[in-house]
Image (cartoon, rainbow, N blue to C red):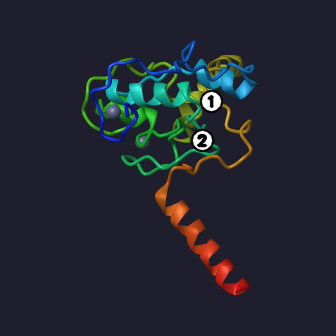
Amino acid sequence: MSSQRGNVARTRPQRHQNAGAFRNDKYGASAQCKKINAKLHDGVCQHCKDVLEWRVKFSKYKPLTKPKKCVKCLQKTVKDSYHIVCRPCASKLDVCAKCGKGEEIVIPIDKGSEQTENAADENDQRQRSRKHQLEEGADEPDFDIFLDDVEDDDDDPDVFKEKFKNMKIERSLKS
Ligand SMILES: [Zn+2]
Ligand SMILES: [Zn+2]
């Protein structure tokens, strides 16, 4: 049988092939989906950029609901999903914002906008006009939009283990 397990020597092509490539907006993109599709993955290395683009493409990219702790400055300044280093630190230390390694950055962080919304630089920002701040804020991710808690990765094995354990307990209670 050609479909036999381990039989890699089959000659006919696969019977059913996708007519087109996978599209995450096939059934109409939501506002959130459009925003994610348009996102620029700057400050990360080629590998991490590929991973992020893959996540976006297959609707596996989950926006952050609240800023996460930066592994360098230990402040809650990380505003991009899956990043471990905040933008100011990544640009200062010249490391990838996602893996934290000194890899070559594909799209360097725009130094002009990196300090936007940074509480530590509030004194500097006071000198800028309010209109200017609002304009800059336009390309920052808006955390208030995403209200559901989507921060947890659903492919986390621990979560599954925990769910399974609860299921078992439920079953033993019933019997
Ligand atoms: Zn930092
Ligand atoms: Zn990286």
Quick one: label 2, few (<14), some, or many (20+) residues within 10 Å? many
Q: Which secondary structure, mark 1?
A: loop
The CA span between labels 1 and 2 is 9 Å
Quick one: label 1, few (<14), some, or many (20+) residues within 10 Å? some
| Near-viewer residue (147 or 23) | 23
Label placed on residue 141: 1
Residue type marked 2: Leu
Where 94 falls versus 112 (above or below)? below
Q: Position of residue 173 (x, y in %)?
A: 70, 86
| Near-viewer residue (48 or 72) | 48
User: In screen coordinates, is 51 left or right of 164?
Assistant: left
Residue beneath label 2, please?
A: 64
Q: Residue at x 40, y 47 (%)?
A: 73
| Near-viewer residue (133 or 8) | 8
Q: Position of residue 56 (x, y in %)?
A: 54, 27
Q: Are marks 1 and 2 in contact (CB under 8 Å)?
A: yes
Q: Position of residue 157 (x, y in %)?
A: 47, 58
Where 79 falls versus 165 (above or below)? above
Residue type marked 1: Pro
Label placed on residue 117: none
Instruction: Of the two numbered discs 1 and 2 on the same chain, state the one appearing first in sequence.
Output: 2
| Near-viewer residue (173 or 9) | 9
Where 150 falls versus 157 (above or below)? above
Residue 60: image quadrant is top right
Q: Residue at x 55, y 18 (%)?
A: 18
